[in-house]
Amino acid sequence: METDMKQQRDTIFVPAGSAELLSILGMTHHTMITPDETDGQFTALVVDIPPECGPPMHSHATDSEFFYVLDGTLTLSDPDGDIEAGPGDFCFLRAGGSHAFRNATDRPVRALVVVTPGGDAHRFFKSVDETIRHEVDMPLLAELADRSGIALTS
């Protein structure tokens, strides 16, 4: 991560505006900290999700995700249905469970996302950012996901 991050013995500080930016399927991921920097415990990012944007239904073999909505309304989906989450709402998505999220509104959404342990997800985010820039190539996306322990389920 190329940031102005400051690390002391037990503290890591990431100043505002210094996160690594990744472009993932139309969304912007502000990578605050990676599994490499947390001894493999988690990755944390702030995700900006434009209107009518979000990933397809998918599952993570080993990663669980926590979403905390900062701004806007985010639709979180699983096989049981949809949940509308607004500012201050929190959602936990278990590893192995199929889920998706989408900004179904005409206003931007911003959410804090923590993925644990996060190594597979971080590897996937980096590979998508480096490989898929404009048109989403679904077979390539599925291949990159599979390499990172993620299955596209719809």
Image (cartoon, rainbow, N blue to C red):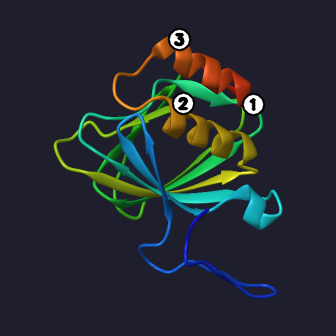
Tell me which label, 2 or 1, sits earlier in the chain: 1
* Residue designated by label 2: 99
Disc number placed over residue 139 in the picture, else none: 3
Distance from disc 2 to disc 1, alpha carbons, whole Å, reads 12 Å
- Residue drawn 74% across the image and 57% down it: 35
How packed is label 1: few (under 14 Cα within 10 Å), some, or many (20 or more)?
Answer: some
Query: Can residue 151 be seen in this snapshot?
Result: no
Query: Which corner quadrant of the image does residue 7 belong to?
Result: bottom right
Q: Is mark 2 on a helix, strand or loop?
A: loop
Which quadrant of the figure contains the N terminus?
A: bottom right
Tell me which label, 1 or 3, sits earlier in the chain: 1
Distance from disc 1 to disc 3, alpha carbons, whole Å, reads 19 Å
Of labels 1 and 3, the one closer to you: 3
Of labels 3 and 2, the one closer to you: 3
* Residue designated by label 1: 61
Image coordinates of residue 149 in percent, x first then y, are 73, 29
Between 115 and 132, the one nearer to me in the picture: 132
Q: Do the residues labelled 1 and 3 touch (CB within 8 Å)?
A: no
Tell me which label, 3 or 2, sits earlier in the chain: 2
Three-letter amino acid code of the residue under disc 2 = His
Classify residue 59 as left or right of residue 82: right
Q: Are marks 2 and 1 in contact (CB under 8 Å)?
A: no
- Residue drawn 59% across the image and 42% down it: 126
Between 106 and 21, the one nearer to me in the picture: 21
Image coordinates of residue 102 in percent, x first then y, are 36, 36
Three-letter amino acid code of the residue under disc 1 = Ala
